[in-house]
Amino acid sequence: MEMMEKPTVSVIVPVYKVEAYIRKCAVSLFEQTWKSIQYVFVDDGSPDRSIDILKSVISEYPDRESSTIIIKQENKGLPAARMAGLAKAAGEYIIHVDSDDWVEPDYISSLVQKAVDEDADVVYCDFFKEYDKKPAKIDKEKDFLPSDGKGAVKAMHNSIIRAYMWNKLVKRDLYDLNNMFVPRFGYHEDIVFQTQILFGAKKCCHLDRPLYHYRRRRRGALTGSSLIRTRRQSAANMFDLYDALPKDSGPVTACGIDILLRGGWYSCIIFNFKLLSKHPEAVKVLSEMDYVKHCRVPVAKQVYTKLCCKVMRLFAKWI
């Protein structure tokens, strides 16, 4: 039986310095076979012609214009841009799209169909990795058990599934905007958001089809940033997330040690002990932990992280 054009899906697209890519992204979104879509573009103070190009594309799709919003703000970074878009999102489901990528025509309809058929709170799909000078590669996601939110955050922190915001259709009810911790930095911000969002899911489903085109190795993209800087940002985001979450309930009960291990390893590998010293609880937990199997941070790296934290405790009276 053919589905009615419900539910509505809000697509949130942060825009910053993507004038070479925004047209392809926007066209792929406006040509979706699913009709009940709210488009929320967030102009994060982009200094180039990205928004002018976007407006030109919008004018070519008058049937989509009334359901399209452009939010303008000064440059605040990706996490803040996501939150600005979420504040305006009115759909029953939400998905995020990066403005330098593009999607298949049935991207939304296929994800929605799976969500309705399976009565799922979250549906995640496979994707294409797109390169400038070599053929695209299909990247397959995996299934995990248990398939609830607790299983999802554990699987994500252990790299069984990716943390990407753009291959996951999520029920709006899972976003608690009033209490959501917003990361300070852009690197691994998706892990911070998804840890909080996915945990509340009753059921997560894998759609075994590539529907998203993820552009890799674009010059100027965040993934090309300094390795030391990105590790420092990621570590700070992980520690801040751990500090912000309740310790006796919620995501920490499922993946607290995984959050701390990622932050601890990134801090230790770049010798950023000043950052570690600001999080004495993390240092204590990591110095006393049992080694974790099947973790995103391998045991050899766990040994190094634990040793560093033990040494810090020997020389620091505050832990």
Image: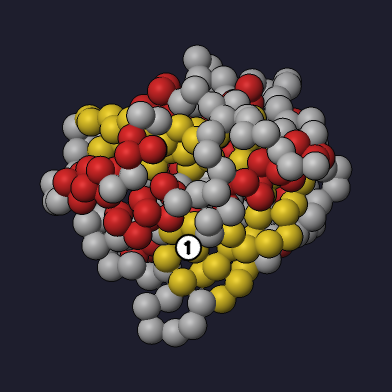
Q: Looking at the image, is 198 positioned above or below residue 30?
A: above
Q: Residue at x 35, y 60 (%)?
A: 24
Residue underneath mark 1: 214
Q: Residue at x 74, y 52 (%)?
A: 206
Nearest the eye: 120 or 5: 5
Mark 1 is on which residue type? Tyr
Residue with the most extreme bottom position:
134
Residue with the most extreme top position:
178
* Quarter in which the N terminus is drawn: top right
Nearest the eye: 55 or 98: 55
To which quarter of the image does residue 25 belong? bottom left
Q: Looking at the image, is 155 positioned above or below residue 87?
A: below
Residue 152 is at least partly visible in this image? no
Q: How is the image coloured?
A: secondary structure
Tell me where residue 237 appears, x and y as whole percent.
46, 39
* Quarter in which the C terminus is drawn: top right
